[in-house]
Amino acid sequence: MEPTDLIKTLRKAWAFVLFGMLLGGSAGFGAASIATPEYKATTKLFVAVQTAGATSATDVSQGSAAAQQKVRSYADIVTTGSILDPVIDELHLRTTTSALARRVQASINSNTVVVAIEVTAESGQQAAAIANAIGRSFVRVVESLEKPTADTASLVRAATVQEAIAPTAPSSPNTTLNIAVGLALGAFLGFGAALLRSVLDTRIHTAREVADVTPTPVLATLGYDPDVKKQPLIVSGDPRNPLAEAYRTLRSNLQFVNLASGNGSFVVTSAMPSEGKTTSTANLAIALAETGARVALVDADLRRPRVADIMGLENAAGLTDLLIGRAEMDDVVHRWGRLQLDVLPAGQVPPNPSELLGSAAMRTLLDLLSEQYDYVLLDAPPLLPVTDAAVLATMAAGAVVVTAAKRSRTTQLRVALERLDRVGASVLGIVVNMAPFRSRGGYGGVYEGSYGSYYGRVEPVELSTTTTTTTTTTKRGRRLRDTGTRSDDLAPASGKEDPR
């Protein structure tokens, strides 16, 4: 992972970090609240070696060095039973020697003969009492140990130089410290969780991630529209919408793609279902027809056909009937709106979709459509569940693969492209669909601000109603309609018109 990816992950991880900090801070406060308060009291003892007969500074120095050496060993006996047992008896403590020893800590400052004894207890008075009692017991035990004989004086003298004072505030828990530690750990764990999620998340989020999967160009990035089910045809229903402009960008980029077979027929598919391929195909067909091109939209998804529903047409008969010879093209092709856009629905779902789509009849039909129209768009099933799209892609100029942001996975897209490559089909480009809006005022951040407000708020200008006469004729020589067309009729309209 590159540093830029780490920064991006951190920006996206703010919710994880914030949640981790809240959780860690709450845990720290809770731990401090339920913990039993503890108090610490410290007494200090001075240990000196008797240097009787010392007549020079050297003798005194030697005695001090001997005392420092002895003090190091004295610190180890502070927590032994010889010192703690008398304290338990004196204060009538309900504890054992080992339990008390865990609450006692002896320390020695470097190059000194001072022993500091620190005691932890549940109350300040008790901590001070125990510390002072240990100090007195320490003096007695050390002096008795350093007596050469019972009748002689001890070679070491120990005395209390600072008695323990009962503290007024507990030493633990430290609520502020616990909360601070909890916040720090929570932030660290939150970022770690976000980083792990980023590493394990194989979903496609941006066009840059598509570039990591394939060198195939990204033709467009289409934003997520929550109202797509209510108004799927955004290009005709809301032509000034930034998403409609994104479809026109897709149209422009597609027009510059080098079509290997020399015709304008191509398959629109996806790796998995529910990635928005049908909606994208329908809007792209309208956007192409807006330029005056002759466009045929074919519902080649004979398993779950949806083009007729989106375009507002009947699906009683269609592609299936053509392929089995039960209908003529004039009977099943519908003119849509006021554009040169013809729609061929799927018709009834057959028991053998793959065989029909791979038949010679399908190839013949596609050749005929390519002669009569400038563009032929085939809405095909997803690539991974079935082989229909791969079969169709070998007959057309190529395939456009739609992938849904935050839904499709890189492995799925990679396998889908490999399937097209194995059958020798050309992939014209990738369309990243359902990209998240950064704000309601702009599409995917691209149109935010200037473009978003420009395309989303300007009222359309009513055009004049000058009447002209137009005759539209297909390459097969049959006149479709002679109509008096007004200039305001050039705007696309949804619904079925002039079925044939």
Image (tube, helix red, strand yellow):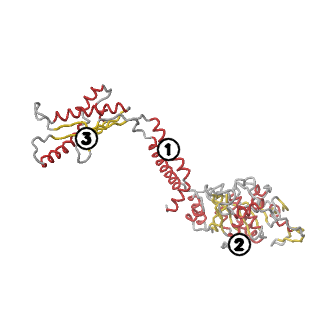
Label 1: few (<14), some or many (≥20) within 10 Å?
A: many
Which residue appears at 80% of the width and 67% of the height?
340
Q: Nearer the viewer, residue 230 or 171?
A: 171
Give the mark nearest the N terminus, 3 or 1. 1
- Left or right of 78? Residue 427 is right
Do tag 2 and tag 1 residues touch (Cβ < 8 Å)?
A: no
Give whichever of discs 3 and 2 has the lower sequence position.
3
Give the residue type at disc 1: Gly
Circles 3 and 1, Cβ within 8 Å, touching? The answer is no
Which type of secondary structure does the marked residue at label 1 adopt?
helix
Check disc 3 and report the residue beneath it.
115
Q: Position of residue 454 (x, y in %)?
A: 73, 64
Residue ID at (56%, 50%): 15
**Does residue 324 show up?**
no
Closest to the camera, between mark 3 and mark 2, is 3
N-terminal of the pair, mark 2 or mark 1, is: 1
In the figure, 99 relative to 345: above or below? above
Q: Residue at x 89, y 67 (%)?
A: 465
Image position, residue 349 (x, y; %):
73, 54
Q: CA distance from mark 3 to mark 2?
A: 96 Å
Q: Is residue 182 left or right of residue 109?
A: right
